[in-house]
Image (cartoon, helix red, strand yellow):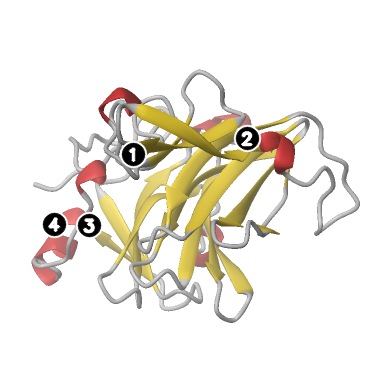
Amino acid sequence: MFSFRKISLGFALLLGLTNPASAKPGDIFIDPLDATLIRREIPGGQAEIIFRAQDLPTESSLHPVHFGPQKFTFLAVNPEGTILAFSAQAGDHEWSGLYYLANKDIRQLNLRFESKSLAPYWSKDSRYLVVEEEESTGRRFLEIFDLEKDDHCVLDGRAAKNKFLNFLQPWWSEQGERIFFKAEINNRYRKSLGLKSLNLSETIGEANPRCQKLALKPLSKFLAEQPRETIPQETKVTLSPSGEN
């Protein structure tokens, strides 16, 4: 049976590196000892600095917000190895952006107020990027960016008419025309409103990159309908009932 897990900065750095010490030449990662640095492994067991948090903008391009001290929290390199998608803590705010290695341009994608920007995930053709995000209530949702059209949309439980659903741990289909993700009950949010905890059977959601054609299916039905769908290795672990969040 396929299963899923969360990827933490400390274990995977969103690059499939379980240990930066085992990085191969060309691998790019957040420095585990200094989160203000992004490094690239070079031959000889060295790691050169390719991007510094001090080079990030000090003000948001989306809102009149001045950033405090910044550090990188999550990182994903596009399949061609030319663009870094990252999330950063910036004082009281968090945001996600892109860093283009060729011309060193920086592009801000979002800005979070009292919530978190978490892991970014690239589509296979590098056109789409989905960022996992979390509100102060613990509610998890996905923001999908169409980099070709400079557009974005939000995929969350309210689209399924259930504000207590978390959408998380996404992955893309091979052609990038669909996004898949885990759906679970946010019992932390329910408890904050005085509601009892619930369990949701192992459930997979899918939608298109415009956050449309949303469908939720039991894991068993999903696997029966998509037996050949590739699930990334880093998301395969034992699924357990939602339980406490």
Can the viewer see residue 149 in this picture?
yes
Residue at the farthest top position = 33
How far across and how far down the image is residue 65, in percent?
87, 46
- Separation of residues labelled 3 and 2 (CA atoms): 27 Å
Seen in the image, is 215 located left or right of residue 55?
left
Residue at x 82%, y 38% (from the top left corner): 67
Q: Nearer the viewer, mark 3 or mark 2?
A: 3
Q: Give the amino acid type for the residue marked by disc 3 in the picture.
A: Pro
Find disc 3 in the rendering and name its residue: 218
Image x and y of residue 235, in percent: 26, 44
Residue tagged 4: 220
Q: Residues within 10 Å of mark 2 (few under 14, many from 20)?
A: few
Above/below status of 6 relative to 110: above
Q: CA distance from mark 1 to mark 3?
A: 13 Å
Q: Nearer the viewer, mark 2 or mark 4?
A: 4
Whole-Å distance between the Cαs marked 2 and 4?
Answer: 32 Å
Q: Which mark is residue 193?
A: 2
- Mark 1 vs 2, N-terminal side: 2
User: What is the three-letter code of the residue carrying label 4?
Assistant: Ser
In contact (CB < 8 Å): disc 3 and disc 4: yes
